Image (cartoon, rainbow, N blue to C red):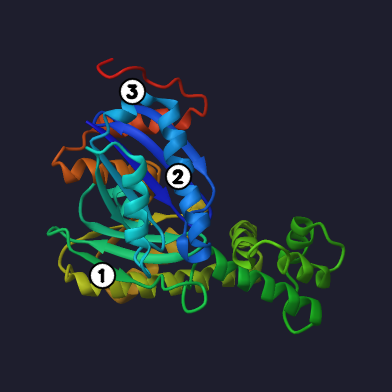
Amino acid sequence: MYVLGIDGGGTKTSAVIADENGNIYSKLVAGRSNPTAMSKQEFELVIRDVILNIQSQNPNIFCELDCCYAGMAGVGEGNYESVLQQILQRYLPSKTEVLIANDAVNALFSGTLGREGIVQIAGTGAITVGIDEQKELFRSAGWGYIFDDEGSGYNIGIAVTKAVFKAYDGRGLATSLTERLKSHFGVSSIPEIIEKVYGDAHPRSVIAPLSVYAVEEALNKDEIAQAIIQKACEDLFISIKACHSKMKLKEKETMVILSGGVFSKVELFIPRLEELAKQSHINVTFKKPLIPPVGGAIIAGLNSRNVPISSVFVRNFAEQQKNDYLTMKGQVGE
């Protein structure tokens, strides 16, 4: 069985064709594909280019696609789900089943391998999604960077810039984040950062990557960076707790998968989140994903056909994803 998995978000879009044994036949990474942060035309062009690129890598396998599972940020808002459905059906083989969901499902299954649980995504944006044994989906947060997104890369990036400007004014404590931002933007004084943020790119895409400095400087014991990360953990846990309460799993240990660029140094977050869970008497355990989120999209596609996920799948998929110079599999039946 051949599945095309797509994982689309506010920073990048990943796509892979794989089979039930985790063998990869085509893969690529493209630009962002969150329709709420780009025009409809831009969105359509990104999806079209993803499909055409994947097809060109292995046309024979592409023609045999059984399923396409697209987990995409923002598709549940407005009319974007139907737009995506139309685009995919236009470029995919006619026999290919198209399934669309939030990208959080990809991230969840990349850790639970298709089983129930909660995923906390903290990348450019942030969202908490849970799926129970009956496959019912529960959501908390993730309503967009203007209204929500506490604990996201963007939200942490905002906290970093605020802290730096407050330190510059004398309204806040000095922080090592100041030098990190000056170096990042290539400026000699803090006020010069303003024109860098309000440039041609969307401010969200400029600010979100700054979250990495909060993580790194928190590990270096910077007091301000540590406070920023602590606040992010508290914000994220509120959302996890809300999602967990909806799922009515109080007596059963629930796996919480931590996914997204904010968790690049997950060892900084897990102890803090575990302490918050202990204080709230919530039976959860925090884990890293086993494979990239796009692999979770493959698992979701296989699940839709009741194909079991084996340890062979995880091992093969993880190993092949690591190799940037992957020699793609050949013809159908090889």
Q: Is residue 246 visible?
A: yes
Tell me: 164 left or right of 143.
right
Give percent across and percent down for residue 205.
60, 61
Tell me: 194 left or right of 312.
right
Residue 60 numbered mark, or none = 3
Q: Residue furthest top?
A: 334
Mark 2 or mark 1, whichever is nearer to me? 2
Rendered residue at 35%/34% (across/down)? 17
Q: Is residue 107 visible?
A: no
Work out whether mark 2 precedes mark 1 in sequence or the reverse, and give the earlier one. 2
Q: Quadrant of residue 191?
A: bottom right
What's the amino acid at mark 2? Answer: Arg
Residue 48 numbered mark, or none = 2
Decide: few, some or many residues near mark 1? Use Cα within 10 Å; few <14, some 14-19, many ≥20: many
Work out whether mark 1 precedes mark 3 in sequence or the reverse, and give the earlier one. 3
Decide: few, some or many residues near mark 3? Use Cα within 10 Å; few <14, some 14-19, many ≥20: few
Label pair 2/1, CB-CB below 8 angstroms: no
Q: In the rendered view, would you say 34 is above or below 26?
A: below
Judging by the rendered image, the residue that carries numbered circle 1 is 244
Rendered residue at 24%/58% (across/down)? 117
* C-alpha distance separating marks 2 and 3: 19 Å
Rendered residue at 48%/61% (across/down)? 40
Give percent across and percent down for residue 174.
75, 73
Decide: few, some or many residues near mark 2? Use Cα within 10 Å; few <14, some 14-19, many ≥20: some
